Amino acid sequence: MIYGIGTDICDVRRIRASLLRHGDRFGQKILSDAEFGLWKARSARNPERGVRYLATRFSAKEAFSKAIGLGMIMPMHWRLCEVGKLSSGKPTIVLHGALKLWFESRQLAAHISLTDETDYAASFCVVEQTDIPSRDQSHDTTRAPDH
């Protein structure tokens, strides 16, 4: 069952301006440690690819936060949500810490899609509840029936 959906579009020029103003601190605020390392490596090879990488991660985390219905309120935090990649190349959401515990306790699964062009990065996220108790299982069987 669908728990929530979220979408986001990010202006790459805005991310570039934030990087010029705040430097690496901006990346450190948005990216997990693993993402930060990839971002620095991509930026060293091709600065424009680095900016678009950061913009897609920003957009994906915004879309995810909307899909779970929290926005940027704890336990949702930029650095606790990571955009990884499966061996097939498919993007995936990897969670850490309190956000991971919150997400798993609700038996949720996330599906993310991201894209970027010269000036924009966009993301779409669907979060589903993977195990919903059936109606029979949701009743309290320890209580005596009312007669």
Image: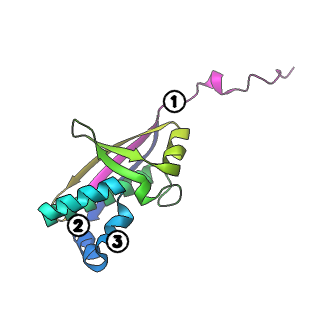
Residues drawn in magenta: 121-147
The one nearer the camera, 144 or 52, is 52
Instruction: Please say if the residues under marks 1 and 2 sit with CB atoms less than 8 Å apart.
Output: no
Disc 3 secondary structure class: helix
Height in image: 7 above or below 94? below
User: Dividing the picture into quarters, in which one does residue 14 lie?
Assistant: bottom left
Residue shown at 49% from the left, 50% from the top: 97
Circle 2 residue? 12
Nearer the observer: mark 3 or 1; the answer is 3
The one nearer the camera, 81 or 63, is 81
The numbered disc on residue 25 is 3
The one nearer the camera, 133 or 135, is 133
Location of the C terminus (image quadrant): top right
Circle 1 residue? 131
Q: Position of residue 113 (x, y in %)?
A: 28, 46
Q: Position of residue 22 (x, y in %)?
A: 31, 77
Q: Is residue 136 magenta?
A: yes
Q: Position of residue 38 (x, y in %)?
A: 24, 55
